[in-house]
Image (cartoon, rainbow, N blue to C red):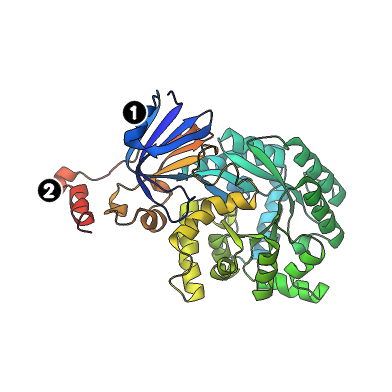
């Protein structure tokens, strides 16, 4: 049988079924979808393709889903280092955005971020920013699949004059992408402290009518929680619950200062949380109780946030950091297990976006959104546990191939800066000697 592309992998981590590493497998792609998954020896007998990619030391897995980005903020990367969140926003970010904000700024910043993400193994991002149609243009030009946001925020901007304008434009955005296979839309009230009760209710109504996720920063700082208690007599999640926003469409970004009652409400409602550890650390927002969310059964995704508060869009690095912080915060080295974290970085994000029937795992019939991560470098050798070394040893520099809907959108050749001849021995042969001892 003829196939568009056949990817021959040393290891395949499909995410579904969970806790699975397969060896010497091929993924067959036809019409942008995964047509078959089978041992490479069988694939060579069954399929012909003019595009066979042989990866003898690589893991193939689902593309990474960046559940929270502000892609255009790549243009203001590095601005306002060493400030607290509110100082950072009020004295640096919002003034800079006020000066620069335009459709061109968002499109070109999103293109830059999209290329950075693509080279890092991201195949889909959920973006929250102004001028969402321009964000979609830039991200699609970079080759990514994306969810863009109808942003609602309690002050005027170059994109909207106020709440009525934001809500109307958000609804138009959602309608425009209802049948788009590459661009979905969310409704995105910025945060509880920047959006009124009435506008939050209307966001809940839009989410209900169109079945789209609600993408919102919540419980990001201790000050946010204190302010909510002082102003409303309610914690942020409790307030959002009363306003109809806590359900299976909620994506609660950051959730650093969630307490047990918040986690229970989100678990009961089937909500998702998005963990952005680098941003939380840089802005000293705190340590999200990731292990507690996972234990309660809350769906978890990973996000990089924007480059202005991270400052790199590295989902593998973000997931590694999330795993280690979760163990330390919980005081439990068995928390945030390897396969749980790989799922969070892929299927967890897809599930939060209600896109999991199409992306997030390597399954027959799904979109061929795939990446290859090379484990042949000395930093990953010897390979005793491919899944663990993918999470803890590899980084975005090890990503070599990225496909979206079966189209190769990024490819890089890894180079070695030392000469093995000068070493007097082969590093790979040494590594494999000890790898084969187990």
Spatial CA distance of label 1 from label 2 is: 40 Å
Measured along the vertical axis of the image, is residue 228 above or below residue 381?
Answer: below
Residue under label 2: 424
Horizontal and vertical percent position of residue 93 = 66, 55
Instruction: Please name whichever residue, 299 or 431, is drawn nearer the observer in this view of the structure.
Output: 299
Specify whether residue 67 is in view.
no
- Regarding mark 2 in the picture, which secondary structure is present there? loop
Residue, far left: 424
Within the image, what quadrant is residue 401 found in?
top left
Quarter of the figure with the C terminus? bottom left
Taking the spot 71% from the left edge, 42% from the top edge, the residue there is 132
Q: Nearer the viewer, mark 1 or mark 2?
A: 1
Within the image, what quadrant is residue 259 found in?
bottom right
Label tally? 2
Instruction: Please name whichever residue, 303 or 345, is drawn nearer the observer in this view of the structure.
Output: 345
Which dot marks residue 45?
A: 1
Taking the spot 77% from the left edge, 65% from the top edge, the residue there is 241
Horizontal and vertical percent position of residue 40 = 34, 36
Instruction: Please name whichever residue, 2 or 300, is drawn nearer the observer in this view of the structure.
Output: 2
Taking the spot 59% from the left edge, 67% from the top edge, the residue there is 293
Taking the spot 51% from the left edge, 54% from the top edge, the residue there is 343
Q: Residues within 10 Å of mark 1 (few under 14, many from 20)?
A: few
Which dot marks residue 187?
A: none
Horizontal and vertical percent position of residue 10 = 33, 43
- Regarding mark 1 in the picture, which secondary structure is present there? helix
Give the side of residue 181 with respect to residue 437, left or right: right
Quarter of the figure with the N terminus? top left
Specify whether residue 147 is in view.
yes
Measured along the vertical axis of the image, is residue 291 above or below residue 201?
Answer: below
Q: Which circle's residue, 1 or 2, is located before the other in the chain?
A: 1
């Amino acid at each position: 049988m003829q196939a568009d592309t056949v990817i021959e992998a040393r290891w395949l981590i499909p995410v579904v079924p969970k806790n699975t590493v397969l060896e010497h497998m091929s993924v067959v792609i036809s019409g942008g979808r995964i047509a078959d998954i089978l041992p490479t020896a069988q694939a060579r007998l069954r399929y012909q393709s003019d595009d066979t990619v042989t990866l003898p030391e690589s893991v193939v897995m689902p593309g990474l889903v960046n559940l929270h980005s502000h892609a255009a903020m790549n243009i203001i990367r590095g601005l306002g280092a060493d400030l607290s969140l509110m100082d950072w926003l009020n004295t640096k970010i919002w003034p800079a955005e006020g000066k620069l904000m335009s459709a061109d700024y968002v499109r070109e910043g999103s293109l830059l971020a999209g290329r950075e993400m693509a080279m890092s193994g991201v195949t889909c991002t959920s973006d929250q920013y102004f001028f969402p149609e321009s964000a979609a243009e830039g991200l699609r030009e970079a080759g990514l699949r994306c969810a863009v946001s109808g942003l609602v925020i309690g002050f005027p901007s170059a994109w909207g004059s106020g709440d009525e304008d934001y809500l109307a434009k958000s609804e138009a955005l959602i309608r425009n992408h209802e049948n788009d296979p590459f661009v979905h839309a969310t409704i995105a009230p910025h945060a509880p402290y920047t959006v009124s009760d009435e506008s939050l209710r209307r966001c809940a109504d839009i989410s209900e009518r169109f079945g789209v996720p609600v993408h919102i920063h919540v419980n990001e700082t201790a000050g946010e929680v204190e302010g909510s208690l002082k102003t409303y007599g309610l914690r942020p999640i409790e307030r959002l619950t009363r306003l109809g926003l806590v359900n299976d469409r909620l994506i609660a970004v950051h959730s650093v200062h969630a307490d047990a009652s918040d986690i229970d409400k989100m678990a009961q409602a089937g909500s998702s949380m998005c963990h952005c550890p680098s941003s939380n650390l840089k802005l000293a927002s705190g340590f999200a109780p990731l292990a507690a969310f996972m234990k309660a059964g809350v769906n978890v995704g990973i996000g990089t946030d924007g480059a202005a508060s991270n400052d790199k869009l590295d989902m593998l690095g973000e997931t590694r950091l999330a795993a280690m912080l979760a163990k330390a915060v919980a005081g439990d080295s068995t928390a945030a297990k390897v396969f749980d974290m790989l799922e969070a970085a892929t299927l967890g994000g897809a599930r939060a976006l209600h896109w999991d029937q199409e992306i997030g795992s390597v399954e027959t019939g799904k979109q061929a959104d795939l990446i290859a991560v090379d484990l042949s470098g000395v930093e990953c050798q010897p390979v005793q546990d491919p899944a663990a070394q993918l999470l803890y040893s590899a980084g975005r520099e090890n990503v070599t191939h990225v496909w979206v809907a079966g189209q190769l959108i990024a490819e890089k050749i890894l180079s070695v800066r030392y000469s093995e001849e000068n070493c007097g021995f082969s590093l790979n042969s040494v590594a494999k000697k000890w790898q084969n001892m187990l």
